[in-house]
Amino acid sequence: MKIKPTDAARLIKAHGLHVAGAPLAEADKVVILIHGRHASGEVILPLADRLAQPGLCFLAPDAETGSWYPGAFMAPIISNEPYLSRALDRVGAILAAVAELGFGIGDQIFLAGFSQGACLASEFAARNARRYAGVLGFSGGLIGPEPMVRQDQGSLAGTPIFLGCREKDPFIPARRVTETAAHFETLGAKVTWRLYPGSDHIINDDEIAHARGILAPAAVA
């Protein structure tokens, strides 16, 4: 696959993306990396350094206000609209643009995020179920109030997914992580999830190891 540097640069500029890892025009695979609340694409780029693999490009968009939606992720969906829908559309537009360059969604494009970004990545994958190269959700889960009721259609078709969180994370109830994992399994994903002792809202080395296993060059056929 040959990508013109000018086409790669045009995509990056059009979507206001921060870039880490391999240059997009030279990459074998792409991770759409979504930041958390009150942050930015630039702030989450150090995570790309921890996840780096040969030939892997990380593209990190900025939320317009620093957050993808204003309320809690388990608040009623309507309370986070229209911001949530706009954020999901933004992810979809970036994904489509990367695919138009020639990257295969099912084997070369990953969705990843931390905190609010993990919630957004998970929600996008569930609402747009299909095969992805992988989904990485660090300290996040599917969006919506208790009890979690989903009407997602389609199949994730064996998409490898990793979800990791602390047992007493101050923002993400452990139950929502396990519910999210179970829902992804019903959609046909291959899910690994871990709950770790403690209450820190962080990404630990074990999570990085699991994620790097999914991102590894030989991990996706």
Image (cartoon, grey):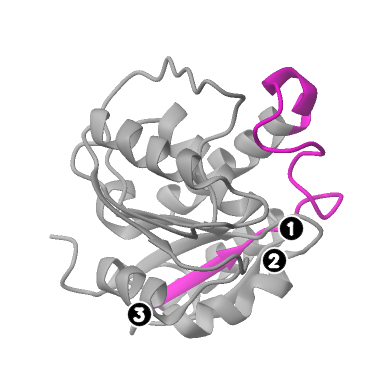
Residue 97 in the image: state x and y as whole percent. Answer: 52, 48
Q: The disc labelled 1 sits on which kind of residue?
A: Asp
Q: Residue 164 is drawn in which quadrant?
A: bottom left
Q: Is residue 60 above or below residue 161?
A: below
Q: Is residue 72 above or below residue 52?
A: above
Q: CA distance from mark 1 to mark 2?
A: 5 Å
Q: Residue 179 is drawn in which quadrant?
A: top left
Residue 73 included in the magenta stretch of the image: yes
Looking at this view, is 169 or 121 the one in front?
169
Looking at this view, is 190 or 157 the one in front?
190
Circle nearer the N terminus (3, 1): 3
Q: Is residue 8 visible?
A: yes
Residues shaded magenta: 56-83
Determine which residue is flagged by label 1: 62
Q: The disc labelled 2 sits on which kind of residue?
A: Gly
Residue 201 in the image: state x and y as whole percent. Answer: 62, 66
Under tag 2, what secondary structure?
helix
Q: Residues within 10 Å of mark 1 (few under 14, many from 20)?
A: many
Q: Is residue 22 visible?
A: no
Residue 117 included in the magenta stretch of the image: no
Q: CA distance from mark 2 to mark 3?
A: 20 Å
Q: Main secondary structure of the magenta part?
A: loop
- Seen as rendered, the residue at the extreme left is 221
Residue 7 in the image: state x and y as whole percent. Answer: 54, 62
- Cβ–Cβ below 8 Å for labels 1 and 2? yes
Determine which residue is flagged by label 3: 55
Q: CA distance from mark 3 to mark 1?
A: 23 Å
The residue located at (25%, 28%) in the rendering is 186
Under tag 1, what secondary structure?
loop
Determine which residue is flagged by label 2: 41
Q: Residues within 10 Å of mark 2 (few under 14, many from 20)?
A: many
